[in-house]
Amino acid sequence: MSHSVELQGVGMRFGATRAVGDVSFTVNGGEFFSILGPSGCGKTTILRMIAGFLQPTEGRILIGGKDMQGLGPNQRPTAMIFQSLALFPLMTVWENIAFGLEARGASKAERRKKADELLSLIALEGYGDRMPGELSGGQRQRVAIARALAVEPQVLLLDEPLSALDLKLRQHMRAELRSLQRRTGVTFIYITHDQSEALAMSDRIAVMSAGVLQQVGTPRELYDNPATPFVATFVGETNAIAGKVTDVADGVASVDTVLGLLRGRMARSVKAGDQVKLYVRPEALSGSIGENRVSATIDRIDFEGAFGLAHGRLSDGAALVASIPSTDLANAPAIGAATSFGFETRHAVVLPDG
Ligand code: ATP
């Protein structure tokens, strides 16, 4: 089993800027773990602290249970793949992959054997003699990963490695990376600002906003039970309906909104009188079923392939988005007409506002 990575109260200041504050989480050995958040939230800073390129100004980082304080990148059982992957352009694929092994004193035969194993792992057998310029973007990315894996790291740190690729290739590489991680059993820590990428690939995800850890959970947990308004709106699309709690019972809050009394599951403890928002996913809104009903006017329906996304306005003027399976689009609400949407109480999440 590969090493775990534990952050205990980790913080980083650059002069007066607090880039990361008091972050604690544990990545289990052999896990595919993502750090997700918008640009500037501190993801890269966390990765650089784990790799040893930066020393945290607060807290501790343990890898495989061992405190990493004061250890540089070469003294840690980690390897990092950067956003702008830099293969050596004048070296062959084979030389690129074997590069780190030479520094470790491996013989030529050992290097050749290891590089061949890795070429087979990334399904590029026979490409060893090519130059990086003779590969596609996805193939270059796979070589960069093979090069990082050559030194047998316990933990592989990946900083948005797919961001330079086009959508189709990115989707293909998601599956490749996931399967590579499964086959090697290496602990992967993957950073991305793309929530669909994080949801599709990860065992668990840490969501960050402005240097603050919002929530750690499986993709399903984050999607179904967001702990903060930030997670509710950043991970997947959602509708947010504001109101005031009138009553709580059995984990369900009744909320007085301008659209009427609506009910939802309490994701955090709230009490009568609290200002809250009800978060309802687009796919939880339907025309016919649900204990709760809201009225909306549809402005347009965007066809997305498997489903259509109906964009409109609730009767209080707030935006509404409902997803309609493509097989039902023939019966979709008319543009400009007032339409009633229902949702089930268990599909709405109530969180304190702000
Ligand atoms: P992106 O997705 O755009 O790469 P990020 O989430 O990785 O963003 P970081 O690069 O970790 O964000 O930066 C977090 C914050 O710390 C930003 O406000 C950034 O400007 C600041 N920061 C990062 N490195 C330094 C530095 N060396 N000196 C000063 N401020 C820095």
Image: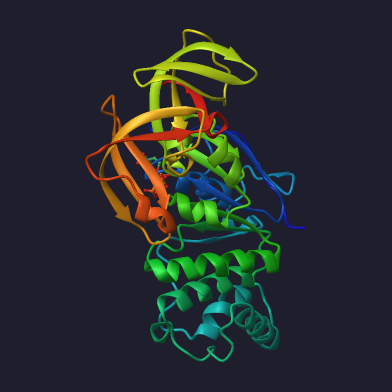
Q: Residue furthest top?
A: 273
Q: Nearer the viewer, residue 64 or 270?
A: 270
Of the pair 196 and 34, the residue shown nearer to us: 196
Q: Is residue 198 above or below residue 91?
A: above
Q: Is residue 50 above or below residue 240?
A: below
Horizontal and vertical percent for residue 238?
A: 42, 38
Q: Left or right: where does residue 268 sit relative to residue 139?
A: right
Q: Residue at x 51, y 91 (%)?
A: 129
Q: Residue at x 54, y 38 (%)?
A: 56
Residue ID at (48%, 36%): 231
161 displayed left or right of 331: right
Q: Quadrant of residue 237?
A: top left
**Quadrant, the C terminus:** top left
Q: Is residue 101 visible?
A: yes
Residue lying farthest right?
Answer: 1
Q: Quadrant of the N terminus?
A: bottom right
Q: Is residue 61 visible?
A: no
Q: Is residue 74 left or right of residue 327?
A: right
Q: Return the x and y of residue 83 as percentages of the image width and height.
A: 42, 60
Q: Position of residue 314 (x, y in %)?
A: 31, 30
Q: Residue at 43% x, 60% y: name it.
A: 306
Count of marks overlaid on the render: 0
Give the percent coordinates (x, y) of residue 307.
Answer: 41, 55
* Camera-nearest residue between 17 and 310: 310
